[in-house]
Image (cartoon, rainbow, N blue to C red):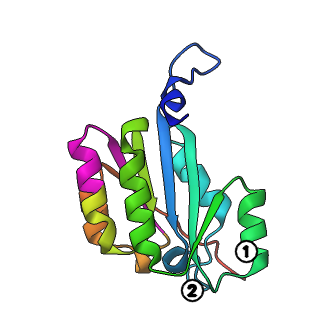
Amino acid sequence: MLGKLREAVSSTGRREPAVGLFVDGPNVLRSEFDVDLDDIRAAAGAVGRPAVVRLYLDEHATPGLIQAAEARGFEVRITSGDVDVKLAVDATAAIDDLDTLAIASRDTDFKPVLEHAARRGLETLAIAPGSHGRSDALRNAAHEAVTLESEPTD
């Protein structure tokens, strides 16, 4: 199934890069960042066609968050263990079927995943939830980096 993801062609007849977006929910969806799932998806979509769009959450995730993520097209993965491990294993397993690997996190644990993807010839994108939540290690490991900024409140 995933092997066919790379074959998508845009309406202009050009092949669009397949992007895998893997979101570290506990480290990104925090009240201090005020990040919107649509903004995360848009950041990944700016570099290609989203082929894998996953949000990783722990067992404390609210049903409302799960429902909102699914309504925005995210495949939600709930784990009772370490979210980081599941995300890293899944992202690494998907590398052969992607052109770009995008990871939304502020956790430096994903630096080796980005480096591995780059060695395998993928473009890499680090998406940070805000400037004070940005990991310089992830930013420096990725080919591109995006920092999401929350809207100013009046």
Q: Secondary structure at mark 1?
A: helix
Q: Residue at x 28, y 70 (%)?
A: 136
Whether residue 98 is visible here, answered yes or no, is no
With 130 as the anchor, is 142 left or right in this view?
left
Tell me which segment is drawn in magenta.
Answer: 114-128
Q: Quadrant of the C terminus?
A: bottom right
Q: Amino acid at mark 1?
A: Leu
Q: Residue at x 32, y 40 (%)?
A: 122
Q: Is residue 131 above or below residue 23?
A: below
In front: 39, or 114? 114
Q: Amino acid at mark 2?
A: Glu
In front: 40, or 80? 80
With 35 as the anchor, is 128 left or right in this view?
left
With 118 as the anchor, is 3 left or right in this view?
right
Residue on which the image places disc 2:
32
Q: Earlier in the sequence, mark 2 or mark 1?
A: 2
User: How far from the left and from the top, in percent, is residue 47?
Assistant: 48, 40
**Of the numbered discs in the image, which one, if any, rests on residue 65?**
1
Q: Residue at x 36, y 38 (%)?
A: 96
Q: Residue furthest left?
A: 119
Q: Residue at x 58, y 74 (%)?
A: 57
Whether residue 90 is visible here, answered yes or no, is yes
Q: Residues within 10 Å of mark 1 (few under 14, many from 20)?
A: few
User: How far from the left and from the top, in percent, is residue 58?
Assistant: 57, 80
Q: Residues within 10 Å of mark 2 (few under 14, many from 20)?
A: few
Instruction: Name the front one of labels 2 and 1.
Output: 1
Q: Secondary structure at mark 2?
A: loop
